Amino acid sequence: MSDFLSLFFPNYCSVCNLTLSKSENLVCSHCLSNVNETNLHLDQPNQLHRRFFEIPNLKYAMSYAWFQKDTVIQHLLHQLKYEGNEAIGLLLGEIYGEELAQYYTDKWDMITCVPIHYKKERKRGYNQSYRIAEGMSLSLKAPFIPLLEKSVNRKSQTKKHRIQRFDNVESTFHQKNSQVNLKNKRILLVDDVLTTGATLQACSQPLQKAGAEISIATIASTRS
Ligand SMILES: [Zn+2]
């Protein structure tokens, strides 16, 4: 924003609401310095690997911050997911990507992300993980390619009990750009929050089957 415009339309920090300086974007540097970083990218393999027992050859597992209530990262992810502030996804992806780029150069051939159901995406207007992956792609200088789609097999589901149906929906993803050859490709799979790891494991299945090497990065992670 120009100096003239910012006189009339100052930008405010998305977390603390203080006026941003010209060099700051969406979040002030004070709030960013309060992010409770995991620094697990410096320690491979690390405690996150234990959540991905279905990815035997998982290369790197990383998460930017610990997910806790009333923290900077929780506020930012809430705005990204529920308040339509999609620019926050790009910003967080860029920030974490820049940090990773200090230690990881030429480690990935492509970056992809966890898809959300198309109805959810239509309602929200975007997929939050898609935005994060785009930001990481800029910083890490690896192409972002949306490779995955959530498969919903309605016919078989109607016959099943509710709990089985839930399990079924949770565990099905497939490769949508099947013309992209994934054999021996080093893929960084991105999501917003890591909890049990079940979704990320389900997403990695078709990629592993196609012969890719998987690494995982999220913006936040629960402690266990
Ligand atoms: Zn702030």
Image: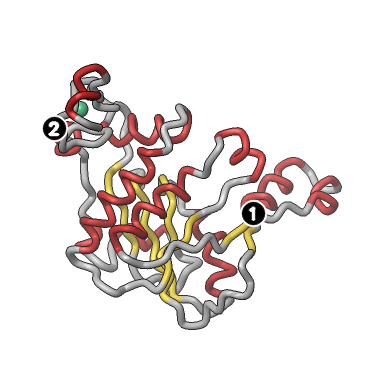
Residue topped by disc 1: 150
Q: Is residue 197 left or right of residue 92?
A: right
- The amino acid type, in three-letter code, at marker 1 is Lys
Disc 2 within 8 angstroms of ligand 1 (CB): yes
Q: CA distance from mark 1 to mark 2?
A: 38 Å
| Residue kind at label 2, given as amino acid type | His
Indicate the secondary structure of the residue bearing disc 2.
helix
Residue 152 position within the rendered picture, expressed as x and y whole percent measured from the top left: 73, 52
- The quarter of the displayed image where residue 85 is located: top left
On the rendered structure, is 147 left or right of 64?
A: right
Q: Outermost residue toward the top?
A: 8
Residue placed at 27% from the left, 31% from the top? 71
78 sits to left or right of 47: right
Which color scheme is applied? Answer: secondary structure
Does residue 29 lie above or below 209 as drawn?
above
- Pick the front one: 67 or 133: 133
Q: Earlier in the sequence, mark 1 or mark 2?
A: 2
Note whether 138 is above or below 165 in the view shown. Answer: below
The label shown at residue 30 is 2
Q: Dot 1 surroundings within 10 Å: few (below 14), some, or many (20 or more)? A: some
Q: Secondary structure at mark 1?
A: strand
Category of crowding for the residue at label 2, using alpha-carbon neighbours closer than 10 angstroms: few (below 14), some (14–19), many (at least 20): few
Between 110 and 54, the one lying in front of the other is 110
Tell me if 149 is positioned left or right of 43 in this view. right
Residue 119, percent from left and from top: 66, 39
Residue 60 location, quadrant: bottom left
